[in-house]
Image (cartoon, rainbow, N blue to C red):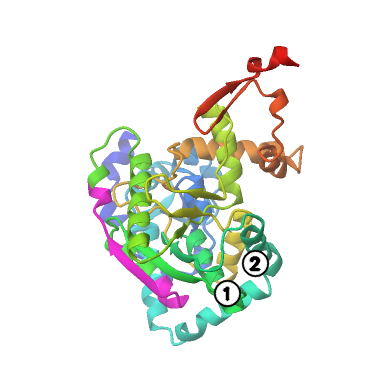
Amino acid sequence: MENAEEIFDISESEITVSELALWDKNSYVLVDVRDELSYAYGHLPDAIHIPLEQLAGRVSELSGSKVVVYCKKGETSVEAVRLLRAEGREAYNLKGGYIAWLMAVVSQEQKDDKKDTFYLEVEQSIRKRFHKKIWTKFTRAINDYELVKEGDKIAVCISGGKDSMLMAKLFQELKRHNKFDFDVRFLVMDPGYSPENRKVIENNARKLNIPITIFESDIFESVFHVEKSPCYLCARMRRGYLYSKAKELGCNKIALGHHYDDVIETILMGMLYGGQMQTMMPKLHSTNFEGMELIRPLYLIRECDIKAWRDANHLQFIQCACKFTDTCSSCQDDGQSNSKRLEVKKLIQELKRTNPFVESNIFKSVENVNLSTVIAYKKDGIKHHFLEDYDAL
């Protein structure tokens, strides 16, 4: 490794997105060294996933004479190039990483004459190909949990990711049916996005024909120096800003893009890491903004189906918009770290191998609570214990 340090020159080991486009695709293998959640959220076409910490033990899996590696911004992937060259491989670092590639895609799309009608194809995919797995489950959640009522004015909150963008398109479709009168506003809060992330959001909104209202805040700067649970604080602050802006616009509800998988993961995370039984509710009354509610219309939609919709339409979205970190996969409202969320994702997949119904069973567990077999529970902040009325029976 020391010898590799002596001969390693990053300037000779970088390749730009435009240069890579000129290479024969059969002459190299493309490796994504980001974490699993990042790769699942979006990656370069044909890229294989080998996290940086696993690369040393999997070099033999890489075919082809050349290896091109990338991370989010082309920074941590430098170490991957160093490692591969030490193993005698001809390796190159994609300059600017996934973000640079995404910016190239955005620039090309802005030149594409087809962009003015693209949204019509996306809408058609919701009505046809994804009618059963997405549209039907969206309307079922709306009806089962009474999420949208006559006279509502809903702020559909768009973070820029796949979930919230799909939610916006679903609300547009719901408005077209217009079985009763309600209104929607498509709200984007910029908490301090990097220029690249802001550009991706604005471009996707144009492509998908979503009339967004953008307002700015300084949340990222506010939490930058917070050492303990900055993502939790950021999430809480973002929700407060969204409630405030939505109310200013005359809305009585905000809609967030949490899906079915978020729900079951939250249930398990609460049990395994929080020592409590709770779930992510389909709707909530705000405790700080009188008359406001939070709704989750994607509550019954599986993440795999959202990804399938994204990929079928060749859409690219931002993942973590935080400009301070390359490792944050998503800022979760529950305050749990992404490593724990990834652990739970893997646990669920492992359990699914022997029990194909494990996901639906986790979901149903919070609908089938038998208080007669519960030691203690809380209701409206008051704790109740089974001994309170045990001797009265």
Compared with residue 343, is residue 326 higher up or lower down, i.e. above or below? Answer: below
Q: Examine the rendered structure and indicate whether residue 216 appears above or below residue 207.
A: above
Q: Quadrant of the C terminus?
A: top right
Magenta segment range?
203-221
Q: Is residue 241 left or right of residue 387?
A: left
Q: Secondary structure at mark 2?
A: helix
User: Whole-percent x and y of residue 33?
Assistant: 45, 48
Q: Position of residue 190 (x, y in %)?
A: 31, 60
Residue at the image position 71 percent from the left and 23 percent from the top: 373
Which label sits on residue 135? 2
Q: Quadrant of the N terminus?
A: top left
Asked which secondary structure carries label 1, the reply is: helix
Query: Is 222 placed left or right of 129 in the picture?
Result: left
Q: Quadrant of residue 53?
A: top left
Is 165 a magenta residue? Answer: no
Which is more toward the observer, 145 or 56? 145
Q: Are marks 1 and 2 in contact (CB under 8 Å)?
A: yes
- The answer to which of marks 1 and 2 sits earlier in the sequence is 2
> Residue at point 33% right, 56% down?
244
Residue 255: x %, y % from top left: 48, 58
In the visual, does 19 lie left or right of 277? left
Amino acid bearing label 1: Glu
Pointer 1: what residue?
Answer: 173
> What is the three-letter code of the residue carrying label 2?
Trp
- The vertical placement of 369 against 329, above or below, is above
Residue extending farthest to the top is 391
Does residue 193 appear in this view?
A: yes
Above or below 180: residue 70: above
How many labels sit on residues? 2
In the image: residue 330, left or right of residue 269: left
- Can residue 94 be seen here? no
